[in-house]
Amino acid sequence: MSGHPIIQWTEDDAPHVARWRSEAGVPPPKRVVIADDRMTADNAYRLACEGSGLLWRGDFQNARQLLQALARRIERKPRRAKAPVAAVSPDQAFHLHRKEQAQRARILGMLLLPFEAGHVIPLRRAPDVHLACSEAWGAADEAYVASMRELLGLIGAHEWHKKGVEIPALGARIHPCYGVFSPVRGEYVDLVAQAPLPSTALAFDIGTGTGVLSAVLAKRGVRRIVATDQDARALACARENIARLGYGKQVEVVQADLFPEGRAPLVICNPPWVPARPSSPIEYAVFDPDSRMLRGFLDGLAAHLAPGGEGWLILSDFAEHLGLRSREELLGFIERAGLHVLGKIDVRPRHPKAVDETDPLHTARAAEVTSLWRLGMRGK
C-alpha cells in the first residue's frame, strides 16, 4: 500500500496518519472531524458540504443510517428555479446531470471508515468485509481509511460476483468482478446471439470485459475466439468466466491494445457508448472520451479483417439523443476507416430507466436504440 496517499487528522489531542484508499482517485479530505453516534444528520450534512471528512468511531449500522440520511438531504435540498425545459438542450441536461451526480458523490464520500490490516473494520456491529475488499483491492498489510460509500460499492460488487448475472443467450450466469462492466443490459448480448455468423472458424472479441460475448460466440459454435482487453481485472474476470462455462479450449484471453495479431473473418467490439470523460477508472466501461475506443476499433478494423469478413460494432445511439455525437459523425468514422455498412440489426432497451419518467435523461433513454452494425471493407 506504499503507493497510496496519506490522510491526516487530530484525535484525542494527538496527530494521526493512515493510508487513504479511493478507487475513484479522489484525494483525501484536507480536514477530518471525528464523528460518532452522537452526531446529528444535519450537522454531518453541513460538515460534508463544507468538505470535511467524517471519520466514524461509532456503531457501523448507525453509520449506514447516517449515509442514508445524508442522501435524503441531498435529494431535498433547495434548488434554484430551473430554466424552461425548451431552453435546456439534451447535452446541457446530460452535463447538468453529471455535475449533480459528482456533487452527490462528493458529499456522500465524506463519511469515512477506519480499517485495520487485513481489511478489518474496528467498529461495533461491523460486518466481515475482508473478502469483498480483497477481491477489489488485494491484500492490506497496514491500516487505512476509505469512504463508507465506496465500501458499500465493494460489498455490492462482491455479491454480484457471487450470484452472477443470468444470461438467457447462454443459459448460464456471468460473474462480473469489481471494476468490470456487468452485462445487466442483455439486449446487446441478444444481438450477438442472433446475428448471422459470417464464419465459425475464428473471431476476435475486442475489449472483452467479463468475456460474455466470447462465451456467446463459443456457444454458437465458433471454433476459436481470441478475446482481448487491457485491464488486468477484466482479463482475470474473462478468464474466470470462460473457464467456469467450459469454453477454455475455444477462447483465448490475451492482453492487447484493441487487436491481437492477425486477421479474422469476424471481429466484434462493444465499446463504451457515451463520448464523455469518466470521473473514475470504473467509468471507462461507460464513457469513452472523444470516442477514442470507438475510433480506434474502426480505424484498425480493416487491417484485422480477413477477406470477406465482417466487423460487428455493438453501439447504442444514446449519445446521439444527448447531442454528444451525431449519426453523421459515426458514419464519417466508418467511411474514413475504409469500411462500409453491410447491414444493421436494432433492438430497444429493456432496462427500467427506459420507462422512468422521473429520470433527468428520460427523453433520450426512451428514444434509445441499440444496434449491431455489420461492417465490411470497402470494395470487398
Image: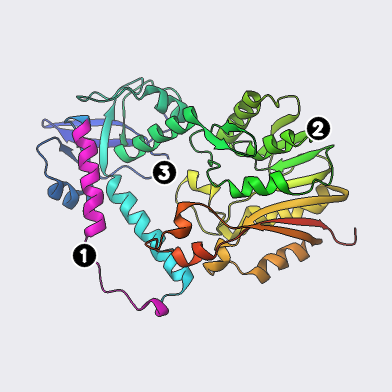
Query: Is 230 one of the magenta-colored residues?
Result: no
- Of 23 and 245, the residue lying toward us: 245
Q: Look at label 1 and name its amino acid.
A: Pro
| Residue placed under numbered mark 2 in the picture | 223
Q: Main secondary structure of the magenta part?
A: helix
Residue 25's label in the rendered image is 3
* Amino acid identity at mark 2: Arg
Distance CA(mark 2)–CA(mark 1) = 59 Å
Q: Secondary structure at mark 1?
A: loop
What are the residue bounds of the magenta stretch? 61-87
Q: Which sits earlier in the primary sequence, circle 2 or circle 3? A: 3
Residue at 25% in and 55% down: 74
Tell me which numbered mark, 2 or 1, is placed earlier along the sequence. Answer: 1
Q: Secondary structure at mark 2?
A: loop
| Quadrant of the snapshot with the N terminus | top left
Q: Residues within 10 Å of mark 1 (few under 14, many from 20)?
A: few
Q: Which one is in front in this view, the residue at disc 3 or the one at disc 1? A: 1
Distance CA(mark 2)–CA(mark 3): 41 Å
For marks 3 and 1, give the CA distance: 29 Å
Q: Position of residue 305 (x, y in %)?
A: 83, 48
Q: Which residue is mark 1?
A: 78
Relative to residue 267, is residue 97 depicted above or below? below
Task: Evaluate if marks 2 and 1 touch, with contact meaning CB atoms under 8 Å apart.
Answer: no
Instruction: Please provide percent x and percent y for residue 230.
Output: 63, 39
SS label for mark 3? loop
